[in-house]
Image (tube, helix red, strand yellow):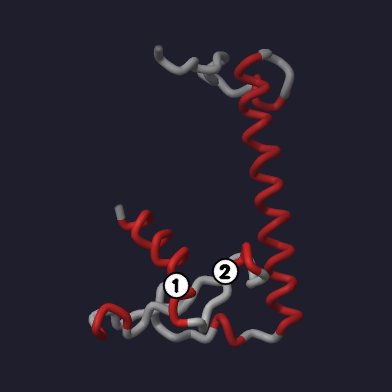
Amino acid sequence: ILIGMLESYGEGAASDGSYTHYMKGGVPGFYPSIKGKNNGQISLELYDPFGFGFRDKPADKRARGLKSEILNGRAAMFGIMGFLAEGKVPGSVPILSKIAGFPHYVPAPRR
């Protein structure tokens, strides 16, 4: 429910004109500030709740962090595909086939 509420807020945050949605030319991954919303009841930010200044990094460090995040996501996808391949075809990933008790099946969804 909380994630749905945050998504709903992110989609409708442009009502005051300070936020541009990423589908309308805004920055992908940017989430508008929620501090002080709901009649002042929200006292912490969502992205940097304790004010460490993560959004205040120089542009080159932010670009490096974004690149690292993308590369880590790609590596995670390759890892998941390796587990799925070993589960479906035993021996296709030699290091995983040496793990005792590795489940060599891909569970199908129930019907």
User: Dividing the picture into quarters, in which one does residue 102 lie?
Assistant: top right
The residue lying toward the viewer, choosing from 40 and 74, is: 40
Residue 33 position, x and y percent, is: 44, 79
Apparent side of residue 30 relative to residue 52 in the rendered image (left or right): right
Q: Quadrant of residue 109?
A: top left
Which secondary structure lies at badge 2?
Answer: loop
Give the labeled residue for mark 1: 13
Disc 1, SS: helix
101 to the left or right of 29: left
Q: Is residue 79 above or below residue 18?
A: above
Which residue does the image show at 51% across and 71% down from the upper left? 31
Q: Is residue 101 above or below residue 58?
A: above
- Residue at left 66%, top 60%? 69
* Quadrant placement of the C terminus: top left
Q: Is residue 51 above or below residue 69?
A: below
**Picture coordinates of residue 57 (x, y %)?**
64, 85
Instruction: Pick whichever of labels 2 and 1 is earlier in the sequence.
Output: 1
In percent of width and height, residue 103 lies at: 52, 18
Q: Position of residue 25 (x, y in %)?
A: 67, 70
The residue singled out by tag 2 in the image is 21
Badge 1, how many Cα within 10 Å: few under 14, some, many 20+?
some
Q: How many marks?
A: 2
Are the two marked residues, 2 and 1, in contact with CB atoms closer than 8 angstroms?
Answer: yes
